[in-house]
Amino acid sequence: MTAIDKYYPYLMEVRKRLFFTLSVFAVAMFVGFFYYEKIIKFIIDLLSLQGINIVFTSPFQFINLAVSCGVVVGAVLTFPLIIGQILSFLKPALKPKEYKMVLGLLPFSILLFLVGFGLGAFIMKWQIQIFLGRSIFLGIGNILDISKLLSVVLLTSAMMGIGFQFPIVLLILMRMKIIKHHHLARQRPWIYLGSFIFALLLPLDSILADVILTLPLVFLFEITLILDKLLDGREVINNV
């Protein structure tokens, strides 16, 4: 039996799951594309953009905005499906106890994604309010490109949602003994630095905002270490 024959069933399984996920993403993207006007109005109201001159700089921005809205809606709606597909695919390779643990973390993963997404949107709203306040105080006019604005807001929010998945991944790796708790704890300075670099890579132009976005990532990392310790203690008690 060749290597291709050995892994062929797994490749077919991956192909089937990938095709299904992409199909759902395409449908969700179409919904976002079709309702992009309502989505844009909702975001504008959410960000409290009253008093700011929001403009189009190109006749093609309508299409760009519709596509951007479609991609974000597709990504958000298919995120739980992607996690479920990965979990289902890995089930045969996991022990019953490991699978139960990962399955139990699934709701927390979705919740953290939503919290991270919301935090990114909140920070962007705060940045815009500062921009508006300073422009009024200095008597300087303000104009924002709607396409660039929404792209930055949506990208920042989505990336923070993804960043908030990091603690779930670390906890799974530690519970499976792939990463040792004490080894990860010793890497604390590098984790802090990596969190700050991640925030720097977001499309924000404020060091203060980068620091604020770094803090919850660091906090979640420390909570993950504490939770792992508590779970270790619980296992010891159960084994006694």
Image: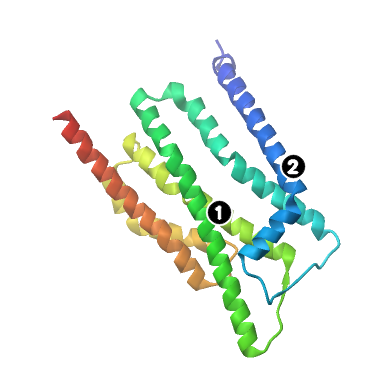
How crowded is the residue under tag 2: few (<14 C-alpha within 10 Å), some, or many (20+)? some
Q: Nearer the viewer, residue 134 or 48?
A: 48
**Residue at position x 71%, y 64% in the image:** 148
Indicate the amino acid at tag 1.
Met
Residue at 56% across, 21% down: 10
Residue 159 is tagged as 1
Identify the residue at horizontal 42%, vertical 57% (top origin).
217
User: Residue 175 location in percent, x, y?
Assistant: 32, 37
> Which of the 4 image quarters holds residue 1?
top right
Residue 203: quarter of image: bottom right
User: In x, y percent, where is residue 226?
Assistant: 28, 49
x, y (%) of residue 193?
A: 42, 61
Q: How is the image coloured?
A: rainbow
- In screen coordinates, is 148 left or right of 2? right
Which quadrant does the C terminus fall into?
top left
- Above-or-below relation of 37 to 239: below
Question: In the figure, 93 relative to 149: above or below?
Answer: above
Dot 1 or dot 2: first in sequence order is 2
Q: Helix, strand or loop at disc 2? A: helix
Where residue 189 is drawn, which disc sits there?
none
Q: Which residue type does callout 2 highlight?
A: Phe
Q: Can residue 111 be seen in the rendering of this structure?
A: yes
Q: Which residue is mark 2?
A: 30
